[in-house]
Amino acid sequence: MTATTSASSVPGPNAARLPSVDRILRLPALANFLPRYGRPAVTRAVREHLQALREQGCDAADLEEPALARALAESLARQHAARLKPVFNLTGTVLHTNLGRALLPEDAVAAVADVLRAPCNLEYDLDTGGRGERDALVEDLLRELTGAEAAIVVNNNAAAVFLALNTLARRREVIVSRGELVEIGGSFRIPDIMQQAGAKLCEVGATNRTHLRDFEQAIGPRTALLMKVHASNYRIEGYAAAVAAAKLCGLAHRHDLPVVEDLGAGSLVELETWGLPHEPTPRDSIAAGVDLVSFSGDKLLGGPQAGILAGRRELVARLRKNPLKRALRVGKETLAALEAVLRLYRDPDGLPERLPTLRLLRRPQETMALCAARLAGPLQAALGAAYEVRTRPCLSQIGSGSLPVARLPSVALAISPLGRGAGRALARLEQALRALPVPVIGHVQENALWLDLRCLHDEAAFLAQLAHLEPA
Ligand SMILES: *Cc1c(COP(=O)(O)O)cnc(C)c1O
């Protein structure tokens, strides 16, 4: 719009010699653009183009129809392209928060499409014909998979923790071990969320060691609950002690207080079964006596972004009545995807094949090695002599704070710039890979760009777009 204003108010020296917007819009070469992009977008693109030509001192003689059509086609396609789009996650982090975390199974994608295309029984009880509860659609599955009496779903795990604290501990105290005052990704910190939820944090113990007596001494008339937080993204090693859930629950229940546990990733299955490191499960927490557990839908569970709260019926009923629940609730897309993913857990043996997150985490190193052998040559050819492509063993991470110290053996293509100005060449390479139709995201280490092949989901598409690569 600025272009229009300045074009009409401050005409350049050659302004008069360029044809009008209307005349250009009538050119046969532009006939396809109007039905495709609509008149306002095409008009704007023509104005901007004319303005750019004016600034370069061009006149009508420079305005060739094919060149104009090409330029407009390019700018319209660029403006029309989706901003949120698929990328290749070759960072080596499987559950990458910045790249959208878990990939959903096809069943879940289809379930989302179904409820988006047609009306659905989101809050309508098909048995009674009365108003239904949206969370009830997945509650039975969640009860079955966690052993809890009741469950609800909110926007994400941060919202789940917030809702639990606001409902159960507003204007009262929550006792937490100093070793569990977690920060996740900068903006989620237990002390801050506690404050925003209106609860007072009562920290006990030391960073490395907290004992049952520390909790016991802190319990007073203002105590609302005892809280455990899973140290998702760090580990305290050496001279360390934490209070096990069962012991903490024993103490809390003797004082008629509930225990709330933020599990973070909260895998629904024993990951050891598939050779992965142990991650605590909601079922174990519930069995140990925890009254309410919360966990994410899009971390190890492998589903859509959601926060799940499972636990005692009476507590879940109170969460449901909090007016904030309405503000934190999930949409039908989320529930459709979550239901489809949870259903897969009823047949755990089928999970490694059917759940993309588990499939990616279990992908054997040989698979990535074979993939590297196929891709190294074509990638080297596309990059030319200024870069060297080497196949290197590497370690992938699970990501999203899950199992922080676990590393999964993988294989990467490591690209090093040759010759002088390597730093700038590396930055140009990253930029060129990001500019591809499906952007390729890797990570820089030891003056090379590493493309970890664990999460390469479409090798043919990766190869096909190498022709567009322009690193120079
Ligand atoms: C990841 C995590 C959260 C935040 O979960 P989101 O689903 O990203 O909101 C909260 N607590 C712990 C312990 C976590 O690991």
Image (tube, rainbow, N blue to C red):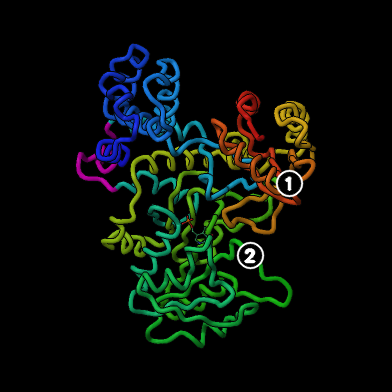
- Ligand 1 near label 1 (Cβ, under 8 Å)? no
Q: Count the marks.
A: 2
Q: Is residue 188 above or below residue 335?
A: below
In the image, which disc is placed on residue 421?
Answer: 1
Q: Residue 22 vs residue 276: left or right? A: left
For residue 129: magenta? yes
Residue 460 shows in the view: no
Rendering coords of residue 73 (x, y %): 42, 23
Rendering coords of residue 389 (x, y %): 77, 36
Earlier-in-chain disc, 1 versus 2: 2
Quadrant for the C terminus, please: top right
Give me the residue at 66% from left, 66% from top: 235
Location of residue 2 by image quarter: top left
What's the residue type where badge 2 is placed?
A: Tyr
Instruction: For marks 1 and 2, give the one nearer the viewer.
Output: 1
Location of residue 42 by image quarter: top left
Give me the residue at 44% from left, 81% from top: 255
Q: Is residue 305 above or below residue 187?
A: above
Start-end of magenta stretch: 119-133
Predominant SS along the magenta part: loop
What's the residue type where badge 1 is placed?
A: Gly
Outermost residue, front side: 13
- Ligand 1 near label 2 (Cβ, under 8 Å)? no
Q: State how far apart marks 1 and 2 are (Cα).
A: 37 Å
Give me the residue at 56% from left, 59% from top: 284
Residue 447 shows in the view: yes
Residue 113 or 8: which is nearer the viewer? 8
Label 2 belongs to which residue?
Answer: 234
Q: Residues within 10 Å of mark 1 (few under 14, many from 20)?
A: few
In the image, which disc is placed on residue 230?
Answer: none
Location of residue 471 by image quarter: top right
Q: Which SS class for mark 2?
A: loop
